[in-house]
């Protein structure tokens, strides 16, 4: 991919490029979230194994896992498109109010 592939040619291309960039940023955010989740959970499992006792780490795994699942669904489904559309409507609204 060359730099010319990322330079828009019209306002429609501007919008497409902006949407693509938002989708990539959302996906990148999810991958970062997933990586941190795996690393922290691995550390907590090790601590739980070393300290013995009940498996308290399962509560953290369950709670954070729900958040991670929600994040993944938001990124990979139409929810992210709905959020992007809402953002665009709000931006237009605020720009109209500024005039």
Image: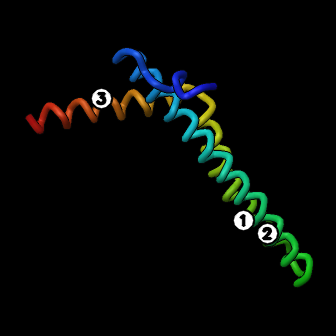
Query: Is residue 75 found left or right of 49 in the rendered image?
Result: left
Q: Earlier in the sequence, mark 3 or mark 1?
A: 1
Q: Which mark is residue 69?
A: none
**Nearer to us in this view, 29 or 83:** 29
Q: At which x and y percent is residue 50?
A: 91, 82
Q: Secondary structure at mark 2?
A: helix
> Residue at label 3?
89
The single residue placed furthest to the bottom in the displayed view is 51
Rendered view: 52 above or below 37? below
* Quadrant assignment, res 27: top right
Residue 64 picture location, percent across and down: 67, 58
Counting every numbered tag in the picture gives 3
**Residue 83 drawn above or below residue 34:** above
Which mark, residue 57? 2
Distance of label 2 from label 3 (alpha carbons): 42 Å
Q: Is residue 64 above or below residue 57?
A: above
Task: Give the residue at x 56% y 40%.
Answer: 26
Q: CA distance from mark 3 to mark 1?
A: 37 Å
Q: Residues within 10 Å of mark 3 (few under 14, many from 20)?
A: few
Residue depicted at 59% across the width and 36% down the height: 75
Sequence order check, earlier mark of 2 and 3: 2
Cα separation, mark 2 vs mark 1, equals 5 Å
Q: Residue at x 71, y 53 (%)?
A: 65
- Which numbered mark, 3 or 1, is in the foreground of this view? 3
Residue, disc 1: 60
- Residue furthest out toward the left: 99
The residue closer to the viewer here, 71 or 8, is: 8
When asked about the image quadrant of residue 46, the answer is: bottom right
Mark 2 crowd level (few <14, some 14–19, many ≥20, 10 Å Cα): some
């Amino acid at each position: 991919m060359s730099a010319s592939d990322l330079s828009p040619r019209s306002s429609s291309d501007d919008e497409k490029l902006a949407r693509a960039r938002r989708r990539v940023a959302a996906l990148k955010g999810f991958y970062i979230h997933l990586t941190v989740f795996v690393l922290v959970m691995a550390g907590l499992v090790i601590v739980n194994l070393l300290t013995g006792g009940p498996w308290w780490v399962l509560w953290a795994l369950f709670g954070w896992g729900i958040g991670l699942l929600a994040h993944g669904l938001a990124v990979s489904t139409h929810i992210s498109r709905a959020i992007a559309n809402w953002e665009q409507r709000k931006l237009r609204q605020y720009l109209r109010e500024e005039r």
